[in-house]
Amino acid sequence: MIEIKDLHKSYKMGSNSLHVLKGINFTAESGELVAIMGSSGSGKSTLLNILGMLDEADSGDYTLDGVPIKNLNETKAAKYRNKFLGFIFQSFNLINYKSAMENVALPLYYQKIPRKERQERAMKYLEQVGLKEWAHHLPSELSGGQKQRVAIARAMAAEPKVLLADEPTGALDSTTSYEVMDLIQKINDEGNTILVVTHEDDIAHMCKRIIHLKDGVIEKDEKVTQVRASQYV
Amino acid sequence: MFDIERWQEIFETIRKNKLRTFLTGLSVASGIFILVILLGFGQGMQNGIAQEFEDDASNRIVVWTQVTTKEFKGLNPGRSIQMRNGDYDHIETRFADQLEGRSARFRVPNAMVNYKKESVGYSVQGIHSGYQQIENQYMSQGRYINYEDHRNVSKVAVISNTIKREIFKNGDDPLNEYLDISGIKFKIVGVYGDRGGEREEERIFIPMSTAQRVFNGSDRVNNLYYTLKPVENLDQAVAESMKFSNDMKRYLQEVHTVAPDDDSAINVFNTLEEVKRFFNLISGIKMFFWFVGICTIIAGVVGVSNIMLIVVKERTREIGVRKALGAKPWSIVGMILHEAIFVTAISGFAGLIFSMGLLEVFGPYIEVDYILNPSVNFNVALSTVFVLIFAGAVAGFFPAWRAANIHVIDALRDE
């Protein structure tokens, strides 16, 4: 599903440049649940941004579902993002003047799906995350865990190939974190490929594979026994 | 533009951001409102001033004389200049094809006017028949002084409505009654009115020849009055009447041996010059109103672009989210511009309709000197709305474009 070969990325900081990614190689198969771990400055956010086509690598190859991601202009990147990727952010990033249902329906709007169908599909995904009754509430009327579940439903709505979660539990307490992870595991059980960036060990161990990043290189890439989050809920 | 999904998206945004939308709309609507009201009053002033000139024939030329102030051909300054019948006759012949109305005037000195036993203090003036048209007088009763009266040296008089009201208090018919002017009986043949007001109606008119002969006037004349034949446009009319005034003045100066540069001996007053000056003043005022109006519009545009900047800033994170979800840059620009244009258009037309309605309803009731029926050209007002919409769109484009090309990561980090 995801193939990365010799990925390099550096940022210019005034006169000297900061080499953030120093040759990353990895492959993720369809249906994997991968945690990317590392301390701050290890390059994990940069990697996720490149994977999410929000940023471009200096060199190296990136293939997503057989499509080489290279020399993208804004319009093309937008198209691919919409088609291939679902994002889950630490700070949820819901649009505050839209109801939960409208938020979930938004990626479908950019797929030019008619309004009626958008709403039906949004409701379906809200039901999946257990928030059907909250569909017409604004984000400000929801708790943090509920907001993240709405965000997950939104990421799912476009039926992407890969879900990218950037510290999905970073802003949540541990109980709510486990609820969210439980949801992510269930989505993965259905066969979706998910990449989770985290710095929390327990969250990482709820995935099936952990990639440790350190100073811009992969330090360790291990398969782990998945800890089911449902036992904590 | 006809994307119904986009419209739904925009209505949703507007509905949920009422204050922002209201403020944008208000700045646009008030800009248009002020412009239309200003333009309306500019037109109102023009109408009002045009009306002020209606009371006299507006191409009137008057000549009067005073004493000379300059030595000329051995003659001392201080000589008083007296026009004669000959001057009047000569000018009449020489400029015959240009003149429309003409009359000389002779003020009867120390006229004592009595009706029966009542004495009244009005000025008595000898005139030619053309004087009626020159003063824009209308007849309420009877007839005006005519050429026959002049030729026959008839002892007839025309009085005004004001005089009639004072003398014939019981509503008696003044026609064929006799007025006593300095001991001589004059038959009243007509009653005139003058829209110029009371002062213009405090005069009794008798034939020129009678005035000169009976009241010892010899062939002396106090004033000459002329109007010229009308021509197509104001500029041409002004040019022709200026030429006539100058030619006539030159002639009179020659005949009366007055220095050509002695401006006070023979005076020519040309109403058209005044009219022209007033119209220049009005166009100046209108220009000023336009200037203020356009400044208001510019302020409106700046307001709109300011709000657009704030809107984009405020929505940076939202734009980032939308881009992460697959919005293309142009769809972001389109969304922001679409909303801006929609709000500007609606509020612009609201301001237009409100201000035009106000002018339509209350304009005719405005009763202030020099302002009459303020109104505005609909097409002009409509074009300004479109200019404003266009300017708003241009002003909104740049922040929208910048927003659309912002990096998603940066946008999402924006707090």
Image (spheres, coloured by chain):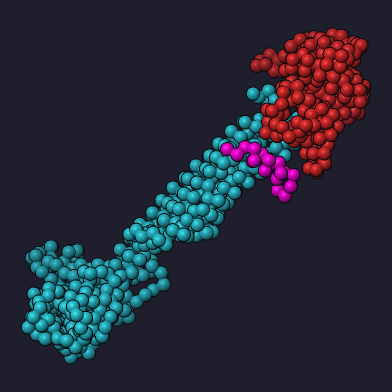
- Residue B400 shows up from this direction: yes
Q: Where is residue B139 in the image (x, y as percent from the top left)?
A: 28, 80
Which quarter of the image is occupied by the C terminus of chain B?
top right
Q: In this view, does A28 lie above or below B23?
A: above
Q: Where is residue B229 in the image (x, y as percent from the top left)?
A: 34, 77
Classify A162 as above or below A122.
above
- In percent of the image, x 53 and y 47: which residue is there? B29
Whether residue B247 can be seen here: no
The residue depicted at 74 percent of the width and 15 percent of the height is: A173
B14 or B59, nearer to the observer: B14
Q: Residue furthest front?
A: A133
A84 to the left or right of B245 = right
Find residue B160 and report its horizontal and vertical position in percent: 22, 77
Based on the displayed image, in which of its 4 quarters is residue B281 positioned?
bottom left
Picture residue at 64% right of the left edge, 41% below the top = B14
The range drawn in magenta is B1-19
Q: Nearer the viewer, residue A119 or B41?
A: A119
Quarter of the rendering containing residue A170: top right
Report the front residue among B40 and A203: A203
Tell me if residue A178 comes above or below residue B372 in the rendering. Answer: above
- In the displayed structure, would residue B114 be above or below residue B54? below
Q: Does the magenta stretch include residue B201?
A: no
Q: Work out whether residue A31 or residue A64 is closer to the camera in this orientation and state it.
A: A31
Q: So how many labels did they put on this image?
A: 0
**Magenta-colored segment: predominant secondary structure:** helix
Q: Name which residue lies at 78% across and 25% down.
A: A149
Q: Chain A is drawn in which colour?
A: red
In the image: residue A31, left or right of residue B212: right
Whether B11 is among the magenta residues is: yes
The image shows residue B330 at horizontal and vertical percentages of 72, 39
Q: Is residue B352 left or right of residue B410?
A: left
In the rendered image, what is the letter of the chain coloured cyan?
Answer: B
